[in-house]
Amino acid sequence: MNSDKSVPRIVLSVLLTFVLVGALPAADSQSSTTGVRVVRLPAGGIQPQVAVDARGGAHVVYFSGESANGDLLYATVNDAGQFSPPTRVNTEPGSAIATGTVRGAQVAVGTNGRVHVAWNGSRRAIPRGPGGATPMLYARLDPGRRAFEPQRNVLQFAVGLDGGGAIAADDSGRVLVAWHAGGPEAKGEGDRRVWMATSVNDGETFSKEQPVSESSTGACGCCGMDALIDRRGSLYILYRSARDVVHRDTYLLRSTDGGRRFSSTTLQEWRIGACPMSTFALAESANGVYAAWETNGQVQFTRVDRTMPGAVVPTEAPGAAGKRRHPSLATNARGEILLAWSEGTGWQKGGAVAWQVFNQDGRVTSLSGRSEGMPVWGFAAAYTRRDGGFTIVY
């Protein structure tokens, strides 16, 4: 496994004043046809994840119910921000978890628009992992798109789930479920690894999980992950390390051979002797694949589908860093990038959602905003509409 470890230079942020959104901010000449729509989930739902299919349809999975033992709901949402009647994803009631914000559902769209969902099981979840361990659950929409097939556990031996996993799919039948855990021999975060189970038949069966990260990095126990398969078939996984307890760095794993071999790149270092309980985001545009993450109260993004330079220079959200967490990315055909994030949230504490649109050169546009009312354990998910505008769901 190749390793390309680098320390980023922090670029000077451009200061902007966020406006409290009542109407959409006016676009500048670089974003003249872009609009940003902000939508709340129905019936008090939280933790949305959105996957857009080849026709531009948006598929949303979100959490509902008691945070420790709740349910996952699936719906589509049209360009006007209207949700279809929800369908429950989890077969067993109360088998999903939202506590801590980082352990919820991940969604991907595969062959013929089929929806795939993976999530950490709750204490009530069945089937269990080996020895009664927390399972990594998976379910897919049935061919008629009427209901989800019975949930399954894809974790065969790499036990020790804490933070959330990730899922990715493509139109060739590949479905990849990843999570970080120590496995049977683990003694702590320092020897946790990222594991991946693979399906080549659109989720019908999965292989035994294999380690895909370097053992030397560890993995931050209570942080989330993200994964993506791009149009060329390359696989990307984002996770946070836990080397020597205090090295909570953002790592990118990339495979160009179907997941057989991965390169490993440090996107940004963060020295902190605690688990930050952070999440990550990946998005693809016509220009390439972008990754977003949090470091020390600031969110940023960079392009990751090409050879990484000796020092990664991410683009930061404008304004002073603070309690900025849980980034989400969306890109459109014009090369514009929307970065959304949570502000002021914490353990059992809600906050706000904020966002900024950048042009294809990474410069800020006048499209920015902030909306209050982020619920406890909540975060936002951004996606691109058919008209090229952006929608943020929270």
Image: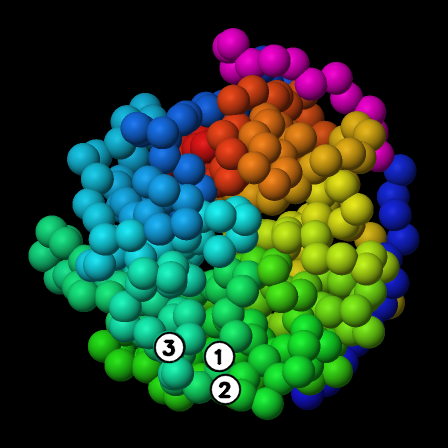
Query: What's the amino acid at mark 3?
Result: Gly
Going from the N terminus, do you reach mark 1 or mark 2 first? 1
The numbered disc on residue 210 is: 2
Dot 2 amino acid type: Gln
Picture layout, residue 129 above or below residue 246? below
Question: Amino acid under label 1?
Answer: Val
Whether residue 156 sits left or right of residue 184 in the image: it is left
Which residue is more in the foreground, 54 or 103? 103
User: Measured along the vertical axis of the image, is residue 343 above or below residue 65?
Assistant: above
Q: CA distance from mark 3 to mark 2?
A: 21 Å
* Closer-to-camera residue (245/10): 245
The residue tagged 1 is 159
Residue neighbourhood size for the residue with mark 2, other residues' Cα within 10 Å, grouped as few (<14), some (14–19), many (≥20): some
Q: Could you say whether the residue bearing mark 3 is in a helix, strand or loop? A: helix
Q: Residues within 10 Å of mark 1 (few under 14, many from 20)?
A: many
Residue 279 image offset from top left, x and y in percent: 60, 52
Which of pointers 3 and 2 lies earlier in the amino acid sequence?
3
Per the picture, the main secondary structure of the magenta-coloured stretch is loop
| Image point (29%, 52%), residue name | 94
Here the colouring is rainbow
- Magenta segment, which residues? 13-24
Q: Is residue 19 magenta?
A: yes
Residue positioned 82% across, 30% down in the render: 320
